[in-house]
Image (cartoon, rainbow, N blue to C red):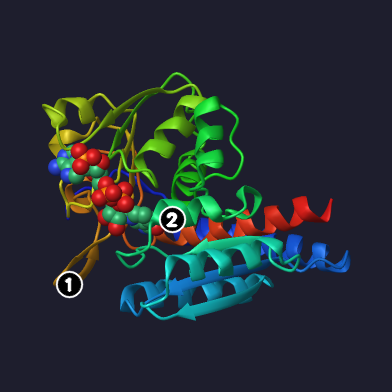
Amino acid sequence: MSGVVAQIIDGKALAQAIRTELREQAAALQVKGVRPGLSVFLVGDDPASALYVRNKHKACESVGVFSEEQRLPATLSQDELINLVKAANANPKIHGILVQLPLPDHIDKRVILETIAAEKDVDGFHPYNMGGLLEGNPRVVACTPKGVVKMIESTGISIEGKRAVVVGRSQIVGKPAAMLLLERHATVTICHSRTQDLGSRCREADILIVAAGKARMIGADMVKPGAVVIDVGMNLVDKGFVGDVDFESVSEVAGWISPVPGGVGPMTIAMLLENTVEAAARAAK
Ligand code: NDP
């Protein structure tokens, strides 16, 4: 690597600071008799999902959030899962509910996500919470885009009036990230697989968020000098995980860049904890 100019947005350190604050908030709630609680449903035995669930459980323990994991067989019926989610909705000890995706093919993800009580929907995927973003009235915000915005804000650069480009239009990252930036008065372009001349669109960006799931697809020639670049991508290659941004070359052009790993990933988990503690605080009122 030659002359690195970009400052690193250290998601790991930022997430650690947030966790420290959350530990204090969780302890304060416990004094009032409310221990924040998260219920995680894992259907089937996908090893990657099992690993994510384990990491979430450990993260909860580290800040004093109670977490219960319901490991369920891949043969579980949709109705059985609905009933279990409804039981968690009614359980006053549980403030957050998370159904680990993907679900087996015979279970309709939308039906399950809509069964979760909106105020316990700590993933922010329920249509009521997604709709809140569109209305400009965010309620529970999805963890990854929420973390992305905190990472941008951590640079001290104002979002208002900036040109923001989001590569990716998924329900869980691209669309909500774009809505959050719009809410903060950025001028937002959303790009996707049919976008023509992606390089030109990306070069317009003062703030570039990439969530496409394509290893190192964004090179230095696609980035405006001095831009804030947030790399959401997590792509498994021979040497481990890499992002959607070619870190080595882009860090010579960008003003700020988030690494993979150690960028958006830890922030996503921190936001799950934050959403759970916030849900418990609402329930305590
Ligand atoms: P999806 O596959 O749901 O969406 C990918 C989006 O990128 C789609 O909108 C797709 O366009 C677009 N896209 C794909 N290829 C291109 C291309 N060549 N040019 C422009 N746009 C393209 O992915 P997710 O949003 O779920 O995740 C994106 C990445 O972020 C993945 O690598 C995922 O692992 C990672 N991720 C990381 C998280 C973390 O905590 N670190 C959390 C969530 C995701 P179209 O709609 O036209 O198909």
Q: Which residue is mark 1?
A: 239
Question: CB of mark 2 within 8 Å of CB of mark 1?
Answer: no
Q: Which residue is mark 2?
A: 10
Q: Is mark 1 within 8 Å of ligand 1?
A: no
In the drawing, does residue 78 fall left or right of residue 133?
left
Q: Position of residue 94 (x, y in %)?
A: 69, 66
Is 76 placed above or below 149 here? below
Identify the amino acid type marked 1.
Lys
Q: Position of residue 140 (x, y in %)?
A: 59, 45
Identify the amino acid type marked 2.
Asp
| Structural crowding at the residue carrying mark 1, measured as other residues with C-alpha within 10 Å and reported as few (<14), some (14–19) or many (≥20) | few
For mark 2, give the secondary structure: loop
Q: Nearer the viewer, mark 2 or mark 1?
A: 1
Q: Name the residue at 74% across, 69% down.
A: 93
Q: Quadrant of residue 191?
A: top left
For mark 1, give the secondary structure: loop
Closer-to-camera residue (201/226):
201
| Structural crowding at the residue carrying mark 2, measured as other residues with C-alpha within 10 Å and reported as few (<14), some (14–19) or many (≥20) | many
Closer-to-camera residue (222/182):
182
In the drawing, does residue 160 fall left or right of residue 217?
right
Q: Earlier in the sequence, mark 2 or mark 1?
A: 2
Q: Name the residue at 22% across, 50% down.
A: 244
Q: Quadrant of residue 50?
A: bottom left
Q: Position of residue 10 (x, y in %)?
A: 43, 55
The answer to whether residue 226 is visible is yes
Q: Name the residue at 50% across, 41% down.
A: 127
